[in-house]
Image (cartoon, helix red, strand yellow):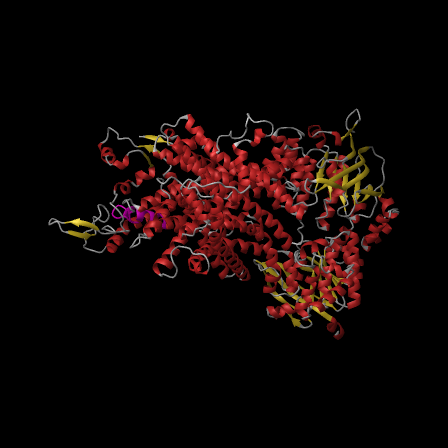
Amino acid sequence: MSFVWLWTDILVWTLVLVLIGAVRSIRRSEQIRKQWFYILKSPIAMSAAIVLSFYLLFALLDSVHFQYTPSKQGEATEQTVSSANNQGVLSLLDVILQHLRDKTERTYSAPFATHEYSTSLSYDESGAVTQVYRPLKFGGQHWTGSHTILDDVMVKTAIPFLFSCIFIAFIFTIHLGWGFVKTRGNYIDYYANQPDPKDELPWGAAYFTLFLLVFLFSWFYYLSHFYHVLGTDKVGQDVLYQAVKSIRTGVLIGLLTTLVMLPLALILGISAGYFKGWVDDVIQYVYTTLNSIPGVLLIAAAVLMMQVIITNNSDWFGSTEERADLRLLFLIFILGLTSWTGLCRLLRAETLKISQVEYVTAAKSFGLSPFRIIQKHITPNLMHLVLIALVLDFSGLVLAEAVLSYVGVGVDPTTASWGNMINQARLEMAREPMVWWSLFSAFAFMFTLVLAANLFSDRVQTVLDPRRNN
Amino acid sequence: MMNQEASTVLSVQNLTVLVDNTPLIKNISFSIGGGEIFALVGESGSGKSLTSLAIMRLLPEALRVTSGSILLEQQDLFQLPEFKMQKIRGKKIAMIFQEPMTSLNPVMKVGEQVAEVLRVHLKLNRSQARNKVISLFEEVGIPEAKERYEWYPHQLSGGQKQRVMIAMALACEPDVLIADEPTTALDVTIQAQVLQLLKDIRDKRGLSILFITHDMGVVNEMADQVAVMKEGEIVEQAEKQAFFSKPRHPYTQKLLQDAIPSNHFKPAVESKTLLQLTDLKVHFPIKKGLFQRTVGYVKAVDGVTLEIKKGQTLALVGESGSGKSTIGQAILKLVDSTSGSVNFSNLSEQTQNTIDLTQLSEKQMKPFRKKVQVIFQDPFSALNPRMTIDEIIREGMVSLQVGSGKKEDQDQRIEELLDQVGLLPEHKKRYPHEFSGGQRQRIGIARALAVEPELIICDEPTSALDVTVRAQVLNLLEDLQQKYQLSFLFITHDLSIIPAIAHQVAVMKEGKIVEQGTVEQIMHFPKHDYTKALLNSAPKLFKERLEVAG
Amino acid sequence: MFEYIIKRFLFAVPILIGVNLITFALFFMVNTPEDMARAQLGAKQTTPEMIQSWKVENGYDKPLFFNGDAAGFDKVTETLFSQESLKLFAFDFGQSDSGRQISADIQERMGPSLAIALPTFIIGLVTTIALALLIVLFRGSTLDTVTMMVAVAIMSVSGLFYIIAGQVLFSKVWHWVPISGYTPGWEGVKFLILPVLIGVFAGLGAGMRWYRSIFLEEMSKDYVRTAKAKGLSDIKVLFGHVLHNGMLPILTGVVVVIPTLFMGSLIMESFFGIPGLGSYTIDAINAQDFGIVKAMVFLGSVLYIIGLILTDISYTFFDPRVKLS
């Protein structure tokens, strides 16, 4: 077993490092800490933040890849690798959801079904042909028929419920303990003397959301050992597995695109606004030109060209995973290159304004170099705009992925993504009877992420946008 | 007794306004008689504007009136339903505001904006309303009223916009006019005209005016009755004569004293020249057309010759747009001079030489940056909101390498500076938003002092401050001048502070210096018509004090 | 004003050259005429002669940017780039891979695109502004809060889902409207109802929030206080003063879009089988027909630039402070 670092893995972990760095510097500055405190003081924002970190956790789990080669020692492993599914590059998440990868059915089956969704021809011993619903190979096969499926599910809910309770209790203990350490043991005194109980974060909402999420996911996880909780698709793959695997694609496109876009927007926007003159003219020309090309078409053109390159140089890529990953990376780059113009324009306008403000004049009268003025006086006063733009863009990018995949210029068809799922579902909805669960799963997973991101960004905007504070 | 009650038009009784249980107005009562100008005076945050909004029932939603009543001709306005209140606003009580620039709808013809009131309240038709508006415009002194009807606010000057506001307020012949700082945003000459207009209207129409202001000079000019507000309370109320001759409350006494900081002219002492401007011109090109050809120039500064002496203050007086701030920027090389010279004399060194700052490159300029520093008008935008106070003060010391490079020494110096400007060492780690306007101005002064300058350009440093705070800041500047032999170029539009600060005065108009000389020469024996007009427009209170000055 | 428009059109030229440069770089430098010839002729047994003759046949035999063989100014003009660009500037888009004239196709397909895009745009704009004004009237109330929550929820759903769900519900289950198709004229209306409704609904959330925040910002301005002090009712203030001022920032975002309505909507048209430019583009992308994609990129840019000019002109009608010069 050896680690495989795909390009997007490297980028996403770099981003995590950057984020950790940012959090550390936030802890140092009282001003920014206070702002974040205000953001999280809203129960909705707190819940949204927890949902977002849950998604991020899955994306990160799915971003640790390794080559799974059959090992010689250890018989336990030998047994698991025997399945064909285990060849190639796997991620941590794949290992956790191993059972879902193994239990592939023949074709469509509905959620919690024990039999296939459509009939197929069957020849009995006498050679007569009958239309039968074939039983599934794995889904619901423990079921004896002595009670209804609903009863069975209810009984089996107990275990994840208990687990979630214990888990939350565990987290709560740690939280209390940490508070105890922080207040150096004077816990009761500390909280009794708290000037205003309103100055606490909404822990109730936080624990409620956390419990809900943990319960939901452990329920799905536990029951997926017995059923196909969200059904199976055309080739019998578990839909829950696909939906969970799609998290990485969605989150990465939302996060990494900003990583590409941000330096461009920052450097060009501030330069245009601060230096004015021909620098401004050139930068304005570049972004007007880019803006004038319809976004989808520019992306489509670029992706088409990339496909040509890939087919012409198929020897560049070691494996299908690498190829799919490179395509994702390329898509992220293209999205980044086409989406920096909006933020750039915003930053340019704001820089123009700030560079007229008197504290910048004061800095000039101290003979500070333009670089220092930009670093000390302009950039810090733009950061709220950057942050607002980033959280706003995130949800837009997640939604854009679906549309692009539909148009055929999104991620690789072999990459799990909600866009690909919806794309497939379009045909499934036309079937009689309808196959609705793929669409439903993609919708539910995507909606939760985008809704959380939108609610969070709304709060960020309310707190950070000075115009909204009045 | 009977008589007095009958003549009361508007009375405010026990008014209390809260925001989140914090009282902003505390149980105030006063009443305004018919044809009376009642001045409500106070510094910023005293609750005087809130009182006027409470009367109009236009308070922001977060504020609550918890007690009190407002009687307009025996009718309690707080008891009326909203739709009836709408019939009072603009008809019985009209209001004009401080900012004529933003108080008019920018996309609607000014005539229409006035006609709208007539159509709503008096149900006039289009042409009736139009004729009425034109006659109103004529009454408030808007020339070419017929044409101006079709104009938009941005085409009018500030004074004319305020006249439109007044016309709008008068349209339905209200009983009470509330004027909330109506002249604060205007130049002195325009202010005098608008005040005169309001007085004339009162005399002609006999309406009552609730006049809200912070300016004692204006109160003295306008008021019949005066009430002083402080922190939501009325601390003193009296007839004008009594109020100005025998103020009772200590706060009122202080306000009156600080209104004219000093009436003693500074003695003219000989001193060496520190900075000499010779025929300085700053022209900004106007570009037009397809290829951005330069079709003309805005002559912001047009041939200015000035002299600033070591350890003395030159006050540069002028109205907005006269180019006085541009001179400051040209000295600091923040704008490029078109021609002329800015000669700085190195008095501190053995070999006394003068250097023309306009000829220096940015790099060559750097040693002179510590000699010339600047203090700004708006204490809110002068400090970077993302930096702590010590970072703000340290910046210049590091950039211009003043004093020791060691951090401990700098920290000690910062504490000294804070102490000098009347702040505490523990303020070091705080952010600007935690300070009041006056404190911020002190921080700005400490920042300039940090590099041990010889000349400080003070660009209207007190015009955003309340009078009591203004007096403190002026005292501080005076002390610093004495202590370090500082020279100031003091840019201001406010004549009343000149005796308190200046040794020399230069009067500026449209990019040119029209007159300069000692304070006494300018104040007592003005030669140029413009200087005379400026002095004439100054409030009586100032002129009275000036009479006895010497 | 006339001078201004001329000036703006002259400024458009370098932008369009830039657009051409980008598309040219994408299509010709990555996928050189050599590659194209090989792909067309088949990978096997392509001799340099065959490639050369294919290039001559298709007009791809000139250098990319700089022709060293030509004389004088022709060094620049006798190149693939300038010839391709010139053709585009003359709106000569050449032939698609299926051998049809692209310009003719575009003209034919603009109608159906507009038939769906225009009503969506107009109905959408009017509904959103009306709803936003209504919400502003009830600002701070529970209705405001709930509507804004709903708006966030509407925003958080992918447009694809609205289309699929709409088709299933209205066409498949309830049989109210046909699932897809198009005929010109009034009979075609039944095909347009569903896509227009879906288009309007999908844009409702984001639009309402945006307009509401604009109107609320206007409500806090000084001139609104003046209007109230005049004794105007809330509704008169909103419609007589706030609406007009609020329209100014809205114009910037809205007028640019109008010319690009000709381009149609990729997703809508392909889901509902409408033979407009959107589905034309999407088919071209799927068939990797570069000629059409190039033409659409150029057309899109031209329309966007026209949109920018229209925005400026519209301001002279709505904002008395703006004079074009």
For the view shown, which residue lies furthest in the left direction? A126
Q: Position of residue A429 (x, y in %)?
A: 33, 52
**Residue appearing at x 27%, y 42% in the figure:** A99
Reply yes or no: does residue A220 show up in magenta.
Answer: yes
Q: Residue at x 57, y 47 (%)?
A: C306
Residue B107 x/y as whole percent:
65, 56
Q: Nearer the viewer, residue B207 or C129?
A: C129
- Residue A52 drawn at (x, y percent): 42, 45
From this viewpoint, is residue A29 visible?
no
Examine the rendering and report whether any part of residue A11 can be seen. yes
The vertical placement of C251 against C299, above or below, is below
Q: Quadrant of the rendered structure where residue C281 is?
A: top left
Is B302 drawn above or below residue C138 in the view shown?
above
Quarter where residue B228 is shown:
bottom right
Viewer-side residue, A72 vs A428: A428
Whether residue A166 sits left or right of residue B549 in the image: it is left
**Residue B4 lies in what quarter of the image?**
bottom right
Q: Which residues are magenta?
A: A211-232
